[in-house]
Image (cartoon, rainbow, N blue to C red):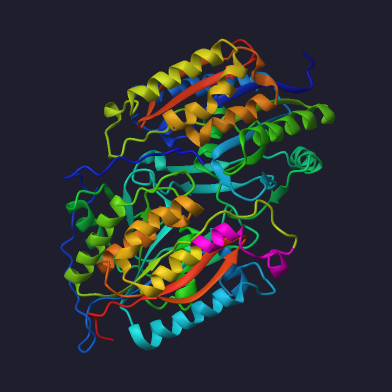
Amino acid sequence: MTDRGIQAGVLLPGMPHLLADKPATSWAALADSARTVGDRLRALEPDVVLLLSTQWFTVLGHQFQCDPNPRGAHTDENWYAYDYGHLSYDLRFDVEFTERWAARVDADGMQARRTRYQGFPIDTGTIVTSTLLDPQRTLRWAQVSCNLYADADTLAQVGRAGAEAARDAGVRAAVVVVSGLSSGLIQQWIEPAQDHIAEPAHDRWNERILQMLTAGDTDKVLAVREDYARQAQADSQFRAFAFLAGTGVAAAPAQLHSYGPLWGTGAAVLSWNLPAPA
Amino acid sequence: MSKVFRLPAPTRGTTTRTRRPDSADAARPAPAGRRPGIVAGYLSPHPPHLIYGENPPQNEPRSQGGWEVLRWAYHRLRRRIRDVHRPDVLIVHAPHWITMVGHHVNCVPNPRGVSVEPIFPHLFRYHYDFHTDVPLAEAIADEAADLGLVTSKLRDPGVRVDYATIGALHMVNPDWDIPVVSLSANNNPYFYSEASLGQMEVLGEATRRAIENTGRRAVLLASNSLSHLHWHEEPQLPEDMEREHPYNNHQYRWDMKLLETIRQGPTSRLRELIPEHIEATASETKAGSLTWLLSALGWPDIAGDVLGYGTIIGTGNAVVEWTPENVDD
């Protein structure tokens, strides 16, 4: 593999419970895995990390974050009553690369929309991810929104455009997608110890998908994705994985670091091609 | 669209996260001569384009106008609010305060800040500063919990107020001189392929009980668009009205079918038609705001008055008034 373009990939959940002071066992395991993956991601010393979070959803075109340094505080509109509902962020975005990526999306016949506004609401998933993967804020991100109405092929095309932009720019890049697995939330206020995958059928589907991913059966995952979305309420129809696959990084078997419940949803930390732990 | 989240039916006996207040002014009666209760309900859509088109001082972007017919409908509504209904409080249910667990009620006394809309930040960067009718807000949350809904009282002023709440409230009352109660949507319009409206019936009932028990004179706002398929790309000039028209004739005809039924009444005919309209048009009413409104009104045997209809990026939007017969002006 050349050392230019996409080198590695990560999929992880963006629920704020990963930052809880008193987490459930599964929340702590997922958070620890995310921190470990972050260490390995930073050891790769990427010039830029492409990012898609299902919690930044849009409906018009594909929005690109072009503010070089969004920073501030964010109170989650659902989890505000908990310690983990209160987040702060200070992100570094590689605007030059983002412009290249957006231009590539435009050139491919899609609509790229540049976003740079003071006070723009950074989504919880992005904040949680950057906090866990990059606590010292050394990584430079390039983020595109998750268009609610874009089909999986289109999101794959957006990912492919990012990979091509990285190769064209001669930069060493990684890709991170923030997505859950099944999304059957428990509709009660629970204690962390009460957490469990909401439906056994969802659990079985998640396990099936994880087996495919760790076997490197990317095409099989993409083939069953719609079924998975219908039967396990997969987060944003698991289109984030299509985006990841579009970058070309998911052809190899994934390494599964953790899997467990997050308020009834299924969540996993997965990586592709990360350097071995130091 | 596939479902991402699914909400099971509410479990009886679940509780709100904070205790019922014993506030002395929780039961503040309306002044003499003005009967308390729900004096009007409005379907009051919120697309940020409407505020953008108005160019109010609170919103940073400037426009050349646009979407005038809908905005004129809101101007009529404002006169009705000011001259006829004269409410103590505006209560809004909005689909973009998306809550993942439970039905939340904003109990922050004075929400203020800047709301940058994540999808249309170029159209909507709004400086808001308004006052909540806290006793009524708490009463709605308590009644809803008593009826078995999972609820939460938002008391953290750090939560950004969403554009659907602001959009409806500004268009109804740009002076913001009437206290407000805002309710979250516990079902995401973008993530559902099927309507899940049962809980909204219960929330409407809870809202009505709280209004009666506190003696408020209230106007209810259902912050929903109708048909909800829309363009995926935007013209260079967002307010280019040459580009504005229904997404397709199917969507338009279904909106007209719903509005004709509203115009004819009674509202009970909408119980079946709203889910059909949702199925046919991906209507934003699947967020439940309209069902909440009509439930709070008690599904009255009256017709609605369609003040205006227009499209916004292809979606159907109508401003509609229902005035219950049993409440004096």
**In which quadrant of the rendered view does residue A196 lie?**
top left
The structure residue drawn at horizontal position 62% and vertical position 28%, both measured from the top left corner, is A242
Q: Which residues are magenta?
A: B237-254
**Spot occupied by residue B11 in the image (x, y as percentages of width and height):** 21, 42
Q: Is residue B33 above or below residue A220?
A: below
Q: Is residue A270 left or right of residue B268?
A: right
**Spot occupied by residue A197 in the image (x, y as percentages of width and height):** 35, 26
Q: Is residue A66 above or below residue B327?
A: above
Q: Is residue A32 above or below residue B242?
A: above
Whether residue A64 is in magenta: the answer is: no
**Spot occupied by residue B140 in the image (x, y as percentages of width and height):** 25, 61
Viewer-proximal residue among B265 and A161: B265
Viewer-proximal residue among A16 and A109: A109
The structure residue drawn at horizontal position 21% and vertical position 52%, both measured from the top left corner, is B145
The structure residue drawn at horizontal position 59% and vertical position 62%, both measured from the top left corner, is B124
Q: Is residue B27 left or right of residue B67?
A: left
